[in-house]
Amino acid sequence: MNRRNPSLILVLTALLVLTACQSSASGEPSAAASEPAASEAAQEPFELSLAHSYQPAQPQVVCGADVIKEEVEAADVGITIEIFGASELGGDADRIQSVIAGDIDMDIQGASALSAVYAPMSAVDGAFVFDDSAHMYTFFSSEASDPLTQGFEEETGVHILGAWNTGARQFTANVPIRTPADLEGLRMRFPPSPQFLMNAAAMGAEPVEVAFEELYLALQQGTVDGQENPITNIDAINLDEVQSHISLSSHQLSSNLVIIGEVWNELSTVQQDALAAAVEEAMVEEPVCAAETEDEIKAAWETDGTMEIVDDVDRDAFREMAEPYLRENFTPEQVEVLDAIRSTAE
C-alpha cells in the first residue's frame, strides 16, 4: 500500500507547519528546546504495549499503529513498542479498562467506545460534526480540543496523544439514498451504540441494531434493508454481494483516538516529544492511506459493476436535519464539544 497521497498530505502538512509557526511566534521555548537532546542524555528504556482491534493490512495498522512504532523507535529515545492487534488483548470496552488499570500502555479506540468512560467524547462521533479529515486534524491539533482531552484525562487518568479519521461512513441499500426522504421505509442497520443510534434518528433513519459479525447474513436474509459503514469495512465483509447501491453520504467520520495510560507521566520530556511526533506523523498518513484504499475499492466496484456508486447525495439536506437534532438531544457538555469542533471548521 502506498502510504502517501501528495494532495492530502500537503493539506495536512500545511496545517502542521502553521501550528508550529504559531508556537514559535509566541516566543516561548518548546518543551524539546528546554530538554537536552536525546543523544545528550541517557533515556530510561520503555517497552510499550499498543493494542487495537484491526487486521494487519488495514490502514489503521499500516499507516497508523505501524507508523507510530516505526517513527518513535527511529527517534532512538529509549522507546520500543510491541503491537497487539485484532482485539488480541480484548474488545474495546475491555481494553479501555486495561489502559486505565495500567495493564495495557497504549490503545487505538473510537470516540464512541471512549464515551463509555467519559460521556462528552461521544460528540466526536456525531453526524456531520466534522467536515472532512483536515477538519478533524485541525481540531485535535488545536487548543479547541483541550477541554475535551483534558477533561478525559482528569476523569480517567488516560492521556490522548492524537486522533485521525479512518474513513467516512456511507449508506448502502438496494436503492439509492440521496435525501432523508429516501430512508423512509428502510430498516437500516446501525451499530448498537447510543451515539450511532442518535445519528440515525437525527437523519430520519429507522435503526435496527445488528452486530457487525452478523451484518452480511442480516442483509442476505432481509432482516435489514441497508446499513452504513466506511468503504473499507463494506469491502472487508463483501457487502457488495448483498447490496446493489452505495450512496456517498459521508455523514460521519470514523474516529480513531490514540491513548496512553499512566506510563505517559513516567516518560521523559524528550520521550514524550518523540512519541507525540510519531502520533502526529500517523495523523497525517492514516487518512491518506484510508482515502487511497477507498479509491481502489470504488474503482474495482465500477469495473466489475457489483456496486452502483451514488455520488449526488444531498448532504446539506441531511446536515440541516442532523445538527438541530443533536443540539436538542446532546447534554450541555456534549454541546460544548460540538461547538468547539465547529469553531475549527473552515
Image (spheres, helix red, strand yellow):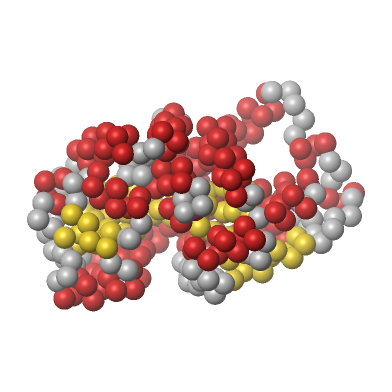
Q: Nearer the viewer, residue 69 or 14?
A: 69
Tell me which residue sits at (16%, 64%) in the image.
225
In the rendered image, residue 291, in percent from the top left (x then y), is placed at: 40, 55
Q: Nearer the viewer, residue 129 or 141?
A: 129
147 to the left or right of 277: left
Tell me which residue sits at (29%, 34%) in the image.
328
* Vertical placement of residue 150 versus 276, above or below: above
Tell me which residue sits at (29%, 53%) in the image.
197
Tell me which residue sits at (66%, 69%) in the image.
82
* Vertical placement of residue 238 versus 16, above or below: below
In the rendered image, residue 114, in percent from the top left (x then y), is placed at: 49, 53
Rendering quarter of residue 207: bottom left
* Vertical placement of residue 165 versus 83, above or below: above
The answer to whether residue 1 is seen in the rendering is no
In the rendered image, residue 203, in percent from the top left (x then y), is placed at: 22, 45
Q: Nearer the viewer, residue 2 or 246?
A: 246
* Vertical placement of residue 143 versus 58, above or below: above
The answer to whether residue 17 is seen in the rendering is yes
343 to the left or right of 285: left
State which quarter of the image contains the C terminus.
top left
In the rendered image, residue 34, in percent from the top left (x then y), is placed at: 82, 36
Rendering quarter of residue 188: bottom left
